[in-house]
Image: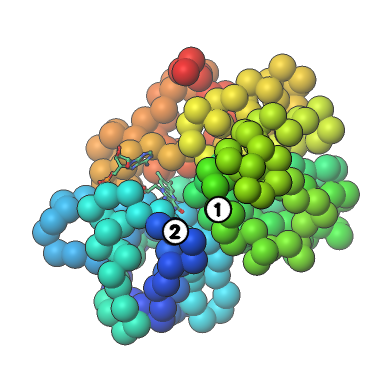
Amino acid sequence: MSVEYKIYKVISNFEISKGIYKLIVDGKFDAKPGQFYMLRAWDREPILSRPISVNDLDNKSISFVYQVVGKGTEILKNLKKDDDIQLLGPSGNYFDVNKLSGKVAIVAGGIGIAPMQYLTKAINDIKAVNGITAVDIYAGFRDETYIIDEFKEYINNIYISTENGKYGYKGFVTEIFKPESYDIVLCCGPEIMMNKVVKMCVDVNVPILVSMEKHMACGIGACLVCTCKTVNGNKRTCKDGPIFSGQDLVLIDN
Ligand SMILES: Cc1cc2nc3c(=O)[nH]c(=O)nc-3n(C[C@H](O)[C@H](O)[C@H](O)COP(=O)(O)OP(=O)(O)OC[C@H]3O[C@@H](n4cnc5c(N)ncnc54)[C@H](O)[C@@H]3O)c2cc1C
Ligand code: FES
């Protein structure tokens, strides 16, 4: 990966659900599912760029789906067609779809659904030759759902939960997920939810890969801001991750 930011043009940037935006950037990108880019659409402030996962890509554009939570994403939300955006990446390791087989469960919480679109597409491309028998998604949201319709064609079953019961099961996604029915679990979401899913999988001896979302500064493995604890010592989420084996993580009890 080059450590230079490159400038690209915005194709579109629009709200897809309350506070959730989809940014499409012009260009040919070569990223793998689970990888991320450092995004920057400002000169000095905020000082740091912001890591956002690849939502999807084709041979002429890449998309990012992001939740507006602070200064950086507030700036991103105001980007318009033909504005410049600086991207560094693709960064980090990735979900290696070629290593999957059997029944696959994807568990996502909130904006953790964003990288799962490209992931399900990539699994779909290889599943006939890799012995993948089914791909199910468990997606938990607070109140509104988003982007799940876009990848329905790539999966077998989708199980939704919302905290207010507006869609699907009323409660948390961890209350409807049964890890023992699967050969492997892939997970992305808030740390508290991922910790719970990891514990559930460890208890029934089902392998799980999680995409960690730590605060980042440099995004290239130099500053150690993004470390997480594993049984093999501290690891940098941006360089050694963001995908880690749940069985290797040392979880902080919430
Ligand atoms: C590898 C990776 C991939 C990511 N992919 C996506 C994605 O696809 N879509 C998306 O919406 N977000 C994603 N994030 C999170 C995203 O980077 C942060 O939400 C963003 O940097 C916040 O920037 P901000 O300036 O808007 O908010 P800030 O002003 O920096 O922060 C606003 C609030 O969000 C909290 N926050 C900031 N960063 C994180 C974080 N990494 N984890 C938990 N809380 C945080 C802060 O503590 C604060 O409370 C990803 C993070 C990582 C590490
Ligand atoms: S953000 Fe600097 S080492 Fe990961």
Left or right of 98: which side holds 223? left
User: At 13% from the left edge and 56% from the top edge, which residue is drawn?
Assistant: 45
For ligand 1, tell me if the residue under mark 1 lies within 8 Å. Answer: no
User: At 40% from the left edge and 73% from the top edge, which residue is drawn?
Assistant: 13
- Residue position for label 2: 18
Other residues around mark 1 within 10 Å, as few (<14) / some (14–19) / many (≥20): some
Secondary structure at numbered mark 2: loop
Residue 10 image position (x, y, % from top left): 36, 78
Mark 2 vs 1, N-terminal side:
2
Residue 216 image position (x, y, % from top left): 31, 42
In the rendered image, the quadrant that contains the N terminus is: bottom left
Other residues around mark 2 within 10 Å, as few (<14) / some (14–19) / many (≥20): few
Secondary structure at numbered mark 1: loop
Callout 2 touching callout 1 (CB < 8 Å): yes
Residue 143 image position (x, y, % from top left): 54, 47
For ligand 1, tell me if the residue under mark 2 lies within 8 Å. Answer: no
- Seen from this angle, which residue lies furthest left? 44
User: At 68% from the left edge and 23% from the top edge, which residue is drawn?
Assistant: 200
The count of marks equals: 2
Front residue of this view, candidates 10 and 218: 10
For badge 2, the amino acid type reads Lys
Residue 91's place in the image compared with 6, above or below, is: above
- Residue position for label 1: 144
Residue 252 image position (x, y, % from top left): 46, 18
For badge 1, the amino acid type reads Glu
The answer to which image quadrant residue 38 occupies is bottom left
- Seen from this angle, which residue lies furthest bottom? 82
